[in-house]
Every structure is written in C-alpha cells, then in structure tokens.
Amino acid sequence: MNILVIGSGGREHALVWKIAQSPLVSKIFCAPGNPGIGQLAENVALKVDDLDGLLAFARAEAIDLTVVGPELPLSLGIVDRFEAAGLTIFGARQNAAIIEASKAFSKDLMKKYHVPTAFYEVFTEVEPALAFIAKHGAPIVVKADGLAAGKGVIVARTVAEANEAVRDMLSGGAFGSAGARVVIEEFLEGEEASFLAFTDGKTIIPLASAQDHKPVFDDDQGPNTGGMGAYSPAPVVTPAVHEKAMVEVMRRAVDGMAAEGRPYRGVLYAGLMIKDGEVKTLEFNARFGDPECQPLLMRLKSDLVPVLLACARGDLSGVELEWYDQAAVCVVMASGGYPGDFTKGFPIEGLDTAAAIDDLVVFHAGTVEKDGRIVNSGGRVLGVTGRGPTVAAAIAKAYQGVHAIAWEKVHFRSDIGSKALRSS
Ligand code: AMP
Ligand code: GLY
C-alpha cells in the first residue's frame, strides 16, 4: 500500500514510524513532513491546508490510505473532499471535527448528552461576560471558541485576569475570529489525563491511557503550551476511571454526535479532569494528541495500518488493540522562549548519539535542514521518547536521550513522568 500522512510534527513522525513497521506498506509519503520523517518517508512540499494540492497528489500517486494528523485540515473538510473523490482517508469529517473546532459546540454537545463537564456559558458580548465573571468569581476559565493552537485557554486566578482575557478576545481581537466568541467555565481541580479512542461512529476502541504536561516549566508552572511531554500508561486512569470515561464520556459523545447527524469517525481525544474518582471532560479533540501520540504508539504492539483502514472504511467491529506492557515517556525539547518568541536556526548536536540508544526514538517536530545540518525551526523541536519496563525506567531512558542532545537556548522540563511515580 501507498500511504500519505499529513502533518509535520512529532505526532506525524510517530505515525510514520509506526506505519513504516507494517508489512502492508510499500511506500510512505508525508506532507509536508520534517527531516526526521524524511528518514522513513518521502517528504512532499505541500501545506496541510492545501486541500487541492493534497488531493491531486493522492490521486497522482495512487495513495491507498491518507492519515490526517492535525486539526486544521480536518476542520477545513479534507476528509469530505477525499471521500467525495473515492479515496480512503482516516480522520473526522468537517461536520464532526467541529467537536474540536468550536468549544461552544463541544460544550453544548456535552450538556445535551450528559457528558460530565464544568458548568459554563457562551458569550459574544463583553458586558454579559464580565457580569458572569463577577457573579462566579475566580478562579475561572476563559476559552476562545475556535482553534488557537492550544493557546486560547486562560485559567484566570483573579477576576481582573479573567476580565482582561474576555476583553482581549471579544474586543481586542486576540486569536482573531477564533476569539470572537468565548466559553467561560467553572475552574476544575484534579489531575488531567488524555483519553483517546478509535471510533467508526458506533464501535469505540480505547487506546492506552496517557498524560500530557501542558505548562512550560517544572511543577506545572508558567504558561500552557501544546504539551511539554507525555507518558503512558497514566496511573490516574484506574480501571474504574477508565470505565467511567468509556460510559459517560466516549459513549455519550459518540452517540450524541450520531444523533446530531454528525457521525464521528476517526480518533476522538477527550481531555479529562479526574478528582476523587470522578471524571469531567475539559475538551474534545478530533485527532491524536501531540505529544501523547509518541509514547502511545511506542507502546502499541498491533499493526496500526489495519486499524486506521478499518476506521476509515467505517467498520471497527472485530478490531482489537494489543499493547506492550512497557511504559513510554516522551520529553519535549523546545526552543528557549517557547511558547513566546524564540530564535530559530541553532544547529542541534547529538542526534546520532541519541539515535544509537536502545528503546529510544527521537521524534522530530520543529526541525529543518539548513546547510546539511539539522536546526531548530519551531517551538517544540524534538520529542525524545524512551521505553522501559516501568515508568521510572522509561523516564531514565528518555532523559538519557535528552542529555545526549543540545543546542543553544534549548529548554525542556526535568519532571516529565514524575506524577506517575507519585500516584503509582
Ligand atoms: P483545553 O484546551 O480546553 O483542554 O484547555 C487547556 C488546558 O487548560 C487544560 O489542559 C487544563 O490544564 C486547563 N483547563 C481547561 N479547562 C479547565 C477548567 N475548567 N478548569 C481547570 N483547568 C482547565
Ligand atoms: N497535547 C495536547 C493536545 O494535543 O491537544
């Protein structure tokens, strides 16, 4: 089979790495890819939102299966376009990808179908939003409705901070049209987990549990990022929590989407907040988490390709996933300054040393090749992912890789996975 993966981050490198192990696959393309992906697949210079270009390419190269990584092409309707052209593609259709593309839609869905979540209201005008904040007090959470690369959520510790976030979004143009509508919701305490499942709209097949680390600094300090590291399994997802997440979150969401005439097919990601065994949903995403995908795919024993194909064809019944018992930990190495401004173009040292370490994979995210060298080009640059018999061993393995790699102003968290050690 010829496979096309769309995207250029660590998530897509992990997808390509896993797909490349399938005996069903003869050739992999990745658009636009990155230098790490280029060692396993042919990179194609097409942007993820160039739907016409991607469709023409898939036709010309007789692509048997296209796998969409990021949310943007899903929300632009890439799956609908490919399906209309008779092509097989893994991902949510446009009218289902709205579960991520609009937080107001997603919250209304949760309310209507009794998916446990924080109480909230949706606002387009400043004054009523400020009144809601004044009534409920802080801490309180202000979210831009639309896609904002993981940065549109302000967890406000004070009323003043919440008011400022509302004004920035509704009248200051922060996040553009994504911020023209806001969700304001109750602040939830607890421990977060990422709960992902494949679904064809009826059958739901959960992936192993995972946990992300969103804040940029150790001990969850500093602003939120797209994710500074992740591990799997996550002990906070006990068997009882897993059951609740399946019954109260996944089943209700998938059935709710079907009832709304928006059947959900693809991978559904629920961001959960867990406290005293109770599960609440923070958000849904219409794609694999990044960096959660990296440790998850390092733990997946089953061939991924038949699963993606079955999902794309709309029938997951009979599909089972097998996992390695080992744990996996991904530490993100970022450009110093991220999620704010950072300098690009510093040469990255030590990639070959890290590549020689067993049970370790260095997934590329924000890298490019310049004058024959790999340099940093994005906020999140590498996802150094180790595997081991325990979470502690996987942490040690991942940091062995991290310490082999360096560039100017590199930043990474030194506590990825430590929550799993505390709670196990
Ligand atoms: P979201 O994109 O909605 O998942 O929000 C990004 C991050 O903001 C989450 O991973 C949480 O860390 C935090 N967050 C979002 N909603 C809430 C909430 N209601 N209470 C506390 N923290 C939240
Ligand atoms: N790591 C969080 C996300 O992918 O949304």
Image (tube, helix red, strand yellow):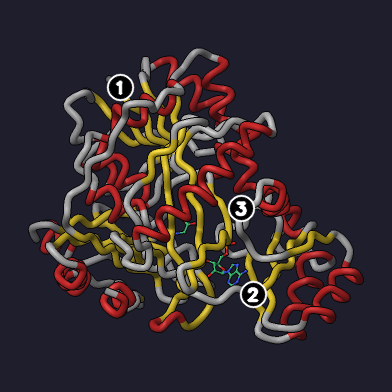
| Identity of the residue drawn at 70% across and 52% down | 111
> Which residue bears the numbered disc 3?
115
Identity of the residue drawn at 47% across and 55% down: 244
The residue carrying mark 1 is 2
Q: What residue type is labelled 3?
A: Val
In the rendered structure, the answer to whether residue 344 lies left or right of residue 118 reads left
Above or below for 401 versus 178 = below
Task: Compare residues 246 and 193 and report the one nearer the observer.
Answer: 246
Residue at the location (49% across, 72% down)? 275
Amino acid marked by disc 1: Asn
**Label 1 – label 3 distance at C-alpha:** 39 Å
Q: Name the residue under label 2.
A: 187
Q: Nearer the viewer, mark 1 or mark 3?
A: 3
Which residue reaches farthest right?
127
Q: Do labels 1 and 3 touch, CB within 8 Å?
A: no
Q: Quadrant location of the N terminus?
A: top left
Q: Which of marks 1 and 3 is nearer the N terminus?
A: 1
Q: What residue type is labelled 2?
A: Phe
